[in-house]
Image: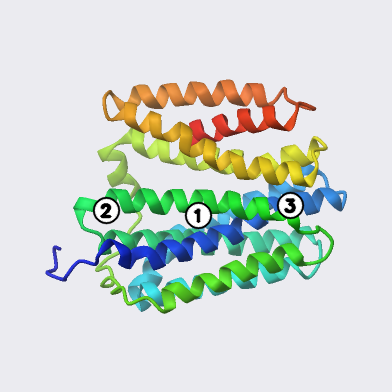
């Protein structure tokens, strides 16, 4: 590696992937629990949307703050601290169905989750050799995505009455601290400088910068509003849990062929094709009120896959 340190074997990074998979399981539980609980309590769908927006705002703040924190105390300590913040944010939800409190909770949650993603990917990037870095990052991403769906699916077996959903999320997140705390994987050196350089990225690739912001917004829209839309449409809790689970496999099934095509042609063409697919699937989804759950799964799986 560039600094002369011995690289880690692929198996050594499993702890980080496992930890983030557990974090994603807890996150998936709340993705489904929050809108379903609000719908059960009689709140309008816009309340769940406002809480989702707070999650996004917290995530954006986490992107700016995580780097300086890592530079100050290192990857492992920041990971543990952010996981603790996730637990605290979920505990706020157990205090009662209060929209303002839940907005604060999800803002903190978004901040911590974004930070955990940054820390874990930075750690993996440092630990992996070029020869297998791409495969490890792909495994990391697929584990995270499927785990979110798995967490949402578990809500099928959890009652919306009482704090069982948030407590299940806390269980996964607390357990996620253990693999990182016990890992023998060397922590990366603190970054010499940290900057979110939008102008530099714009100079390198305007299409890439705009695409990243677009994908971020669309991903939050599709993933976050799917349970809100389904709950408002009168679908049962078990059906929504199944929908959220199978959507994640749709993401993988759509992304792989598009990625393969992008290796053989101009990536801008792939972006245009994916964007058109998003528009078509979104238009179909808007007209699916009352459709069978399996048709809903098919359309939303393709929609989320094209978005990603």
Point out which mark residue 86 bears.
none
- Where's residue 111, x and y in %? 53, 62
Q: Which of marks 2 and 1 is in front?
A: 2
Q: Mark 3 points at which residue?
A: 156
Q: Which of marks 3 and 2 is nearer the N terminus?
A: 2
Query: Mark 1 to mark 3: distance in Å?
Result: 31 Å
Q: Do the residues labelled 1 and 3 touch (CB within 8 Å)?
A: no
Query: Mark 3 to mark 2: distance in Å?
Result: 36 Å
The answer, for residue 115, to whether it is visible in the render is: no
Q: Where 281 falls versus 49 (above or below)?
A: above
Q: Which of marks 2 and 1 is nearer the N terminus?
A: 1
Label 1 neighbourhood size at 10 Å, few (<14), some (14-19), many (20+)? Answer: some
Q: Nearer the viewer, mark 1 or mark 3?
A: 3
Q: In which quarter of the image is residue 222?
A: top right
Label 3 neighbourhood size at 10 Å, few (<14), some (14-19), many (20+)? Answer: some
Q: Where 106 falls versus 139 (above or below)?
A: below
The answer, for residue 112, to whether it is visible in the render is: yes
Residue furthest to the right in view is 42
Please tell me which residue lies in front, 189 or 129: 129
Q: Which residue is found at the position 70% from the left and 49% from the top? A: 50
Q: Quadrant of the N terminus?
A: bottom left
Q: Name the residue under label 1.
A: 60
Point out which mark residue 133 bears.
2
Please tell me which residue lies in front, 117 or 240: 240
Q: Quadrant of residue 79?
A: bottom left
Report how many numbered discs are placed on residues in the image.
3
Q: Which residue is found at the position 25% from the left and 65% from the top? A: 9
Secondary element at tag 1: helix
- Where's residue 282, x and y in %? 61, 26
């Amino acid at each position: 590696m560039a600094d002369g340190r011995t690289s880690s074997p692929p198996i050594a990074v499993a702890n980080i992937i496992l930890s983030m998979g557990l974090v994603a399981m807890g996150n998936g539980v709340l993705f489904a629990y929050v809108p379903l609980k609000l719908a059960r309590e009689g709140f309008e769908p816009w309340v769940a949307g406002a809480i989702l927006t707070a999650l996004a705002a917290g995530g954006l703040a986490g992107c700016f703050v995580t780097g300086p924190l890592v530079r100050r105390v290192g990857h492992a300590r920041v990971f543990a601290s952010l996981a603790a913040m996730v637990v605290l944010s979920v505990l706020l939800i157990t205090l009662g169905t209060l929209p303002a409190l839940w907005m604060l909770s999800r803002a903190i949650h978004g901040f911590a989750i974004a930070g955990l993603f940054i820390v874990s990917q930075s750690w993996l990037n440092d630990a992996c050799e070029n020869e297998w870095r791409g495969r490890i990052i792909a495994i990391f991403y697929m584990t995270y995505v499927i785990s979110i769906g798995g967490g949402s699916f578990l809500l099928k077996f959890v009652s919306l009455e009482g704090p069982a959903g948030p407590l299940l999320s806390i269980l996964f997140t607390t357990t996620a601290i253990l693999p990182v705390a016990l890992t023998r994987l060397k922590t990366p050196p603190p970054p010499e400088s940290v900057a979110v350089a939008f102008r530099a990225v714009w100079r390198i690739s305007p299409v890439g910068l705009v695409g990243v912001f677009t994908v971020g917004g669309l991903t939050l829209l599709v993933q976050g509003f799917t349970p809100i839309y389904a709950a408002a449409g009168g679908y049962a809790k078990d059906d929504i849990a199944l929908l959220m689970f199978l959507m994640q496999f749709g993401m993988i099934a759509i992304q792989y062929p598009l990625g393969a095509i992008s290796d053989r042609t101009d990536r801008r063409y792939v972006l245009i094709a994916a964007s058109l697919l998003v528009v078509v699937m979104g238009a179909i989804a808007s007209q699916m009120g009352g459709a069978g759950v399996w048709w809903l799964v098919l359309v939303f799986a393709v929609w989320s896959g094209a978005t990603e």
